[in-house]
Amino acid sequence: MKTATMPDRLGYYGEFGGKYVPETLMAALDEFESAYKKLRRDREFRAELDDVLRDFVGRPTALTEAKRFAELCGGMRLFLKREDLNHTGAHKINNAIGQSLIARRMGKKRIIAETGAGQHGVATATACSLLGLECVVYMGEVDMARQELNVFRMRLLGAQVVPVASGSRTLKDAINEAIRDWVTNVRTTHYIIGSVLGPHPYPLVVRDFQSVIGREALGQLKKRTGALPDVAIACVGGGSNAIGLFYEMLKHESIRFIGVEAGGRGRNLGEHAARFSGGALGVLHGTRSMVLQDEFGQIAETHSISAGLDYPSIGPEHAYLQQIGRVEYYDCSDDLALEAFHKLSECEGIIPALESSHALGWLLRNGASIGREKIVVVNLSGRGDKDVPQIAALEGK
C-alpha cells in the first residue's frame, strides 16, 4: 500500500473521503488546501511549528514502559506513548497549533471549533490565546455536563463556549452548529476540525500534524528495544490519535495495527459507537465513510461513556485501512474501559483518559493472545483528570 500517495487529488482514500459541502464552503476549502500545500514545504513555517511543539507543547512526549499493567494483559513488553503529557493534556494540541498557525498566515482572525470530550476545545482555545486569535467553541449540552472542568478551562483561556441543545446534544450536533457558523462567517473565520474527519483536506491535514506521534514512537522504540513494535494499538473516535500513531508505521509490513471503538453498553443501534460492526457507507459532515444509521438512512444516536468516542462516523482513511485489511478494528465496552481505567491508575500511577482506556481495555481482555515476547505500543492519547468527576459521580464516590 502506497500510503504516502493517499488521498488522491479529490480527497478520496479508495471510495472514502471527498468534499460534500455547500458551494459556499468550496472556496474556503480550496484556499485552506492551497495554503497547507505551500506551508508544509516552507522551512520557516516548519521551524516555527517545531519550536512551538518543543517549547510550548512539550514534545517529544515520553515513552513509558508499563510493566505491571503488562502482566495483567498477558506479559508482553508494553510501552505507552505519553500524549497525556502534552500541554493541555492530550494529543489534540498538535493539530490545534498547526492549524492556528496556518489560519494566522491566511489572515483569519477568528477561529471556530467543536468539541466532545473538551480536549480539542481546550487545545484550540490555548492555541488561539497563544497566537492572539478570537475563539468560539461549540459543545453539546450533554458533553458540557460530562466535562464541566474543560468547559471552565476553555472560558478561562478566553474562548466563548456555545451550548448546543439540538439533537442528541453531543459531538455530532456541535459539528452541525460549527458548520452553520462557518457558512455564515467564511471570509473571516477558519474552522479547526479536531479529528481526521470532514471534507478534504481536513483528514489529510490533521493526519499530517498528528503523525509526529508515530514518528517519535518509532525512534524511541528503536532506541529502547532495538526493534520495531509488533503491535500498535489506539482508541478510535474520529481517529486522529490512532492515525497519528499508525501513519508513520504503516510502511512496515511486520507491524499489526489495532483500532478500538466504543462498544458502549450494548449491541443495539443507539447503545454504542462501533461504526465497523454496526455502520454502513454514508455521508456525514462533509465526508464519505462508515456511518451508524437506521434503515431509512437517518443518522443514529450513539452512546459511549467517553465523550470523545461518542460519534456516529469515522475518518475516511480508517475506513479505507479497514477495507483493505491493513488495520483491525474492535470495540470495547463501557465497563471494560472503566476496569482498565482503574487498573492502569493503580498499577502504573497514570490516570488515563476514558478514550485511551478503551484501547487499554481491549488489551486487558485480549493481550494474552499476542504473546509474552512481543513489543506492544499503545497511544495514551490523553490524561484522565477531565474524567475523574464523571467517574466519581457514576460510581457514587
Image (cartoon, grey):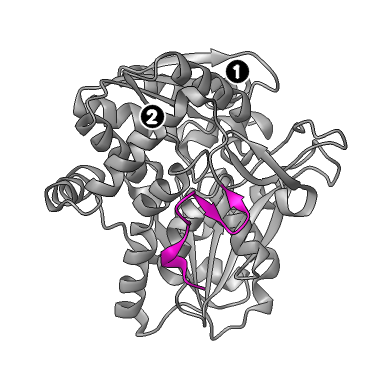
Q: What's the CA distance linking mark 1 and mark 2? A: 29 Å
Residue count near mark 2 (Cα–Cα under 10 Å), binned few <14, some 14–19, many ≥20: some
Q: Is residue 185 left or right of residue 139?
A: left
Name which residue type carries label 2: Ala
Q: Is residue 110 above or below residue 288?
A: above
Q: Position of residue 155 (x, y in %)?
A: 37, 17
Q: Residues within 10 Å of mark 1 (few under 14, many from 20)?
A: many
Residue ID for mark 2: 28
Residue 220 position, x and y percent, is 32, 71
Picture coordinates of residue 180, whole percent (x, y) = 52, 17
Q: Which residues are magenta?
A: 1-17
* Left/right of residue 2 with respect to residue 57 in the rendered view: right
**Magenta highlight on residue 16:** yes
Note whether residue 87 is visible: no
> Of 85 and 122, which appears nearest the observer?
122
Check if residue 308 falls in the magenta segment.
no
For the point 36% across and 75% down, the residue is 221
Relative to 146, say whether 3 is above or below: below
Q: Using the image as rendered, state which of residue 174 and residue 396 is in the foreground.
A: 174
Q: Earlier in the sequence, mark 1 or mark 2?
A: 2
Residue tagged 1: 141
Local SS, label 1 = helix
Asked whether residue 265 appears in the rendered view, the answer is yes
